[in-house]
Amino acid sequence: MFRFLLDGSSGVPPYLQLVHQVRQALLLGYLQEGDRLPTVKDVAADLVINPNTVVKAYRQLEHEGLAGGRPGQGTFITATATPVAPEAQESLRASLEAWLRAAAEAGMSDDAVTALIAAARHDMRKERV
Amino acid sequence: MSEHDAGRGVPALRAEHLGRRYGKVWGLRDCTLEVPAGTVAALVGPNGAGKTTLLEMIIGLLEPTEGQVSVFGETSHADTAETLARVGYVAQDHPLYRDFTIADTFHLGRSMNPRWDQGLAEARMDTLGIPLKKKVKSLSGGQQAQVSLTMALAKRAPLLVLDEPVSSLDPIARLEFMRDVMATAADSTLSFLISSHVVSELERFCDWLIVLAHGHVQLSGPVDDLLGAHRLLTVPRATPDAELPGTVIERTDSDRHSSVLVRADDAEAAVRGRAGWQADTVSFEPLVMGYLQRGSHQSNPVPAERPGPSTKAVTS
């Protein structure tokens, strides 16, 4: 059975941490279509967190089409993540390196780059939700 | 899960202009808030903020001086059997009769509560491995807390109020106690109101946050909504509050820049393209601390625009 972790000091809301862990496990292949997620009560007791947080995370996963509830049986993974193809990854890496060189030439420090990426990602995530 | 479905829609807790005066001093004033059924609400505030006053009016140990408070639609009155039976209460120091056995303690509970669930009480002791013939004084602090929680649960009350339930426990006992509370919350439709000083621990337990300071409600709402509604701005020092987006909650001025906690929907738009301006999301603890510190230095101007009816400015 899949088990969640919680980082109390990360600043990321607990329900988002749970969502991220399922997304990541899907990408890495540790969760697959048909796998059952632990019950709300089991996660609440295991992590010592509010069960409503778990419910909210599972709802978000359902909303994203990654999981689905079956009445009386629990919540199951309904999607299979397609791993990023090696060619796509190569091309993304090349464009990222070009961008990073441009950022360095413009005088951006590593921290500033990280902050800019976080800000852009934050804005994109807000548009998506 | 169907025990309290009938109560859905009716808030677990509603206070309207609730106040209590001790002589000339108001312990709590103009407290208006509503907590929906099924939530785990955290009540946060410094000593003297009015937490205990609020809790005691909810559970019927104290009569309001003005306004009223209701639990699942029924108004609380001090020292009435109906009010006392409607709310389960776990007090800070878990007051139990030390020379009683667990069985005696449950017998007392049964005689005082019309809906007492003896089966639930005994099953919980069995699960926890605490024999009914044991005396209270022979139990560990953690076990005494578990007995107190069991007494509150066996009343079959739809709202459980826990006043600093883990402050006297060691870290492992705290964790086990809260694990039990969270599992109970998952298994039932009970609503919880938990008061605590330990802000850092609360985020994982609660989905509703109430901040009390200086006898007034500073903040009350769903945790995720509150986090989404606030931003931590970094701006040049000289920037006056009036030029900042939303309502300023708390600001820290450095030599050249200021860090400002604001309640604003459009903070990202306001900082975009302005050199030296940045808006970051705020996490749970800084949000709570911002509101707790807000009233502490009175030089802070009270914002003209107030976010909602539940965030009254300090007037006393």
Image: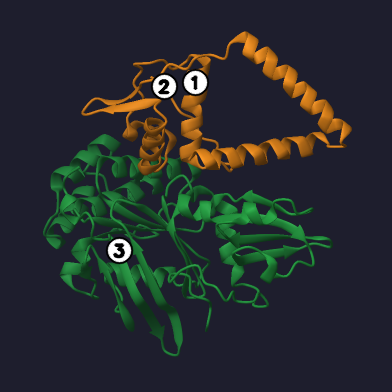
Chain colours: A orange, B green
Question: Residue B13, how many percent across, how many down?
Answer: 30, 63
Quick check: B253 above or below B148?
A: below
Q: Chain letter for mark 3, please.
A: B
Q: Which residue is mark 1?
A: A25
Judge from the rendering whether residue B39 lies leftward or rightward of residue B8; answer left or right. Answer: right
Q: Quadrant of the N terminus of chain B?
A: top left
**How many angstroms separate mark 3 from mark 2 (CA)?**
36 Å
Question: Residue A60, how many percent across, how many down?
Answer: 41, 36
**How many angstroms separate mark 2 from mark 1 (CA)?**
9 Å
Residue at 11 percent across and 59 percent down: it is B114
Question: Residue A37, how many percent across, how many down?
Answer: 36, 24
The amino acid type found where label 2 is placed reads: Phe
Residue A65 visible to the viewer:
yes
Judge from the rendering whether residue B187 lies leftward or rightward of residue B182; answer left or right. Answer: left
The amino acid type found where label 1 is placed reads: Ala
Quick check: B201 above or below B219?
A: above
Judge from the rendering whether residue B277 lies leftward or rightward of residue B131; answer left or right. Answer: right
Q: Quadrant of residue A96?
A: top right
Q: Chain letter for mark 2, please.
A: A
| Earlier residue among tags 2 and 1 | 2
Dot 1 falls on a residue whose secondary structure is helix
Residue at 65 percent across and 15 percent down: it is A89
Disc 2, disc 1: CB below 8 Å? Answer: yes
Question: Residue B149, how many percent across, how many down?
Answer: 30, 51
Closest to the observer, B230 or B138: B230
Dot in front, 2 or 1: 1
Q: Which residue is mark 3?
A: B13
Q: Which residue is mark 2?
A: A2
Closest to the observer, A106 or A9: A106
